[in-house]
Structures are given as structure tokens and as C-alpha cells.
């Protein structure tokens, strides 16, 4: 007879019995070795599985069903079937005979539902902008797969989807989305919701063309932007924030999330270990903290900004009416307006970071030191941010 047990450290907490879900199985009973020919129903990672031995081999059948009274009945019936087959010599060692009915719910799980479950499992760890990528994929799946089961998607379907996706978004974005889809299917296999991953090679097929890095702002442009902001009746509040971005090369979220407690008493150094974006505070992009020694000019700016009685938890740079700066609002109103007025080619505010790295390398600063200041990997720094020419190898004069 099959019995229910828990594959965790607390088997006595699971109520079951000899074909009776209401009868409690004592701890001493569960410690006994299962009798020969017996299939045990276990709870493993909050889902039901069957465990038994036959002809000297240990078998596991993952049902993919959460623990519930109804699902235990289903699992118990499947256990009876396997026990009967072992007793009569009709046992199927490939287990295919037992998977069809027991995993019928798995086979019915749509691709959309699978990705929604995957998103839910990640939601508490991800910022809102990142979750928007997951939502986009759900939209693609609804458009392409409808209610089709995830288990029915073969490699040829994944290839067709990949080709279609490349007609909708840029290759580099498609590569990123396909990596997330592959991760979803891998997660689904771990959760015993699907059996195979047709997306393994899809992202590797995409070779995005090299993208020219943005042009760094010149010193004249930087000075003009800060001056224009400082003299603007509507946007003068942002002048110190932008000068800090230009002067430190911080990521915009790092500057927005900077608190007074992160600034030294004399405002000569700042600790960068957190980022604030869309009201979500988290660690820096690389999960590494750094301390920056500020120039006398930046030190003077912070000393002038800091109130005599300040809250250590208060933000250094705030929106005009208080609270955190909304990077979208700043970009679309203050930043674009000023660049248009100055007739400076538009570049995102994040280019302030690229600008600092480029000028630092132009001045002959050691790339390792620059990477330490900005929180970069040295190779990434050269590849993505060194838009200047003086730091690059030069052709010889022949």
C-alpha cells in the first residue's frame, strides 16, 4: 500500500495513511523502510512525487502537482497503478506509462501561464523597469502562441518565434529577451512543470551588430549645460545634480539615491553603494560599493547644499518640490529643453557617466583607477565608455 510522507526534515507534520488522507501517520511509522513493492507519496519542494524501488533500482516520478487533498488522491491512485503493475510483472521501467495521466496538468500549462508563473517567482527581486521586460514577453507569447501548451513548443517553433521577434525589436534587445525565455524554461524544468528546453540555442543565434558608443560631452558643452540649468527659472534646482553627475561619473540612480549619511562630515568623500530608481532602492548595478574622493569644487557644492540641521536619511539631490528625482521627468522636461535651447546634439543623461570616463582617460589617468572611481570592470570600461581617441592605440607613421 502507498503512504504519504514529506521529503523534508519534518515528516511527522504530514497527515496521511494507508489510502486514507485523514489518518495521521506517526513519526515512528514513517521512519520504517517502505515494504517491498510499495510506492510512497512524498512532498518534495511543495509538490508531490512518487518514490519506490523495483528490481534493485530506485525510481522517482515527479507529478508536478502541489500538495492538496485532491492531488493526493490523484497521486495515491497513480501509486496503486504502479504497485499493481509491479505485482503482476507489467511494470514499465521507462515510466512513460505512468506519466500521461499523472502529468496531464503539466501538459496543459500554456506558454503564457508558464512565463507568468516564472515572472511571479522573480517579482520580489526585480525593479519595475526590469519587470516591464517580462511583461513584454508575455505579450509576445499571447500574440504568437495563444493558449498553446508550453510542452508543445518544439525547437522549430522556437526558431520561428526568434525570426519573428527580430522583425519586432532590435537584435540586442531580442537576444536579451530570448535569454529570459531560456531561463524561464530552465526554471520550469526545475519546478517539474515541463520536461525540455527548446530555447537553449536561440539567443546564441543572434549576433548584434557593433553599436557606436555615444559621443561624450565636451568641456564647453558641460559648462554650458550646467550654467543654463542654473540660470533657468524652472530648472535651476537640477544644476547641482547635473554637475555632480558630470564630475563623478555616477550612474543616475546612484546620484538620485545618495543620502546625507553617505557623505563624509566635511563633504570631501561620498560612499556609493545604493541606487534609487522608480522609487525602488537597491544595491549598485554590480553589487559593489565604492568611496569617491570629491574635487574641491564638488565638495563646496555639497557643503553649500547641506542644511545646518539635516536628516542623515535625507536625499542629497531632490526634486523641486521635494522627494526623489524622477529620471524620466527630468530627462523629458529639464534635460531636453536645455539641450535644445543650447543646440547641443541630444544624448541621454546617462552619457554624463561616459563623458567622465572619456575625459579621465584623455588626461592620461590610469584605467584601473578610473574603473575604481566609477565602479566599472576595466574591460567593460574600455569597450563601452572610452569614446575618446587619446586612450586608443595609434597607427604608426610609416
Image (spheres, rainbow, N blue to C red):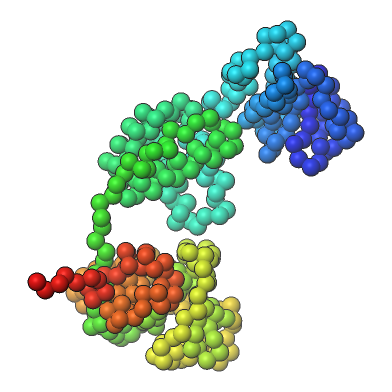
Tell me if 35 is positioned left or right of 238 in this view: right
Q: Position of residue 361 (x, y in %)?
A: 31, 77
Q: Position of residue 33 (x, y in %)?
A: 83, 28
Q: Quadrant of the N terminus?
A: top right
Tell me if 382 is positioned left or right of 310 in this view: left
Q: Is residue 52 above or below residue 192?
A: above
- Picture mark count: 0
**Can residue 235 be seen here?**
no
Q: Residue at x 56, y 55 (%)?
A: 125
Q: Residue at x 61, y 15 (%)?
A: 97
244, 146: nearer the viewer:
244
Q: Is residue 73 above or below residue 127?
A: above
* Quarter occupied by residue 216: bottom left
Q: Position of residue 145 (x, y in %)?
A: 41, 31
Q: Residue at x 33, y 85 (%)?
A: 230
Q: Is residue 287 above or below residue 115?
A: below
Looking at the image, the residue that sits furthest to the front is 398
Q: Residue at x 25, y 55 (%)?
A: 210
Amino acid at each position: 500500500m502507498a503512504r504519504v510522507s514529506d521529503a523534508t526534515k519534518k515528516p511527522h507534520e504530514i497527515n496521511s495513511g494507508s489510502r486514507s488522507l485523514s489518518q495521521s501517520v506517526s513519526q515512528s511509522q514513517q521512519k520504517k523502510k517502505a515494504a517491498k513493492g510499495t510506492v510512497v507519496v512524498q512532498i518534495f519542494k511543495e509538490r508531490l512525487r512518487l518514490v519506490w524501488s523495483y528490481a534493485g533500482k530506485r525510481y522517482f516520478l515527479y507529478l508536478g502537482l502541489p500538495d492538496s487533498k485532491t492531488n493526493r488522491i490523484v497521486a495515491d491512485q497513480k501509486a496503486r497503478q504502479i504497485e499493481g503493475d509491479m505485482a503482476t510483472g507489467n511494470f514499465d521501467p521507462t515510466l512513460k506509462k505512468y506519466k500521461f495521466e499523472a502529468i496531464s496538468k503539466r501538459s496543459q500549462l500554456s506558454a503564457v501561464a508558464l512565463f507568468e508563473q516564472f515572472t511571479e517567482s522573480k517579482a520580489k527581486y526585480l525593479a519595475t523597469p526590469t519587470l516591464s521586460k517580462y511583461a513584454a514577453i508575455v505579450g509576445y507569447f499571447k500574440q504568437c502562441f495563444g493558449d498553446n501548451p508550453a510542452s508543445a513548443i518544439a525547437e522549430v517553433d522556437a526558431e520561428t518565434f526568434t525570426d519573428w521577434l527580430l522583425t519586432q525589436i532590435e537584435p540586442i534587445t531580442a537576444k536579451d529577451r530570448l535569454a529570459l525565455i531560456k531561463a524561464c524554461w530552465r526554471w520550469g524544468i526545475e519546478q517539474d512543470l515541463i520536461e525540455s528546453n527548446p530555447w537553449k540555442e536561440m539567443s546564441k543565434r543572434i549576433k548584434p551588430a557593433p553599436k557606436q558608443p555615444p559621443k561624450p560631452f565636451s568641456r564647453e558643452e558641460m559648462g554650458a549645460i550646467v550654467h543654463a540649468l542654473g540660470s533657468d527659472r524652472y530648472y535651476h534646482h537640477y544644476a547641482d545634480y547635473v554637475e555632480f553627475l558630470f564630475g563623478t561619473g555616477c550612474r543616475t540612480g546612484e546620484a538620485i539615491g545618495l543620502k546625507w549619511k553617505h557623505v563624509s562630515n566635511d563633504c570631501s568623500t561620498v560612499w556609493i553603494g545604493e541606487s534609487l530608481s522608480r522609487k525602488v532602492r537597491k544595491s549598485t548595478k554590480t553589487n559593489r560599493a565604492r568611496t569617491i574622493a570629491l574635487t574641491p569644487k564638488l565638495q563646496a557644492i555639497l557643503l553649500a547644499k547641506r542644511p545646518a540641521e539635516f536628516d542623515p536619511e535625507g536625499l542629497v539631490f531632490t526634486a523641486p518640490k521635494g522627494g526623489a528625482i524622477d529620471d524620466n521627468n527630468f530627462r523629458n522636461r529639464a534635460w531636453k529643453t536645455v539641450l535644445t535651447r543650447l543646440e547641443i546634439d541630444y544624448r541621454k543623461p546617462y552619457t554624463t557617466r561616459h563623458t567622465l570616463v572619456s575625459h579621465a582617460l584623455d588626461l592620461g589617468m590610469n584605467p584601473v583607477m578610473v574603473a575604481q572611481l566609477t565602479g566599472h570592470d576595466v574591460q567593460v570600461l574600455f569597450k563601452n565608455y572610452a569614446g575618446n581617441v587619446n586612450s586608443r592605440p595609434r597607427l604608426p607613421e610609416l
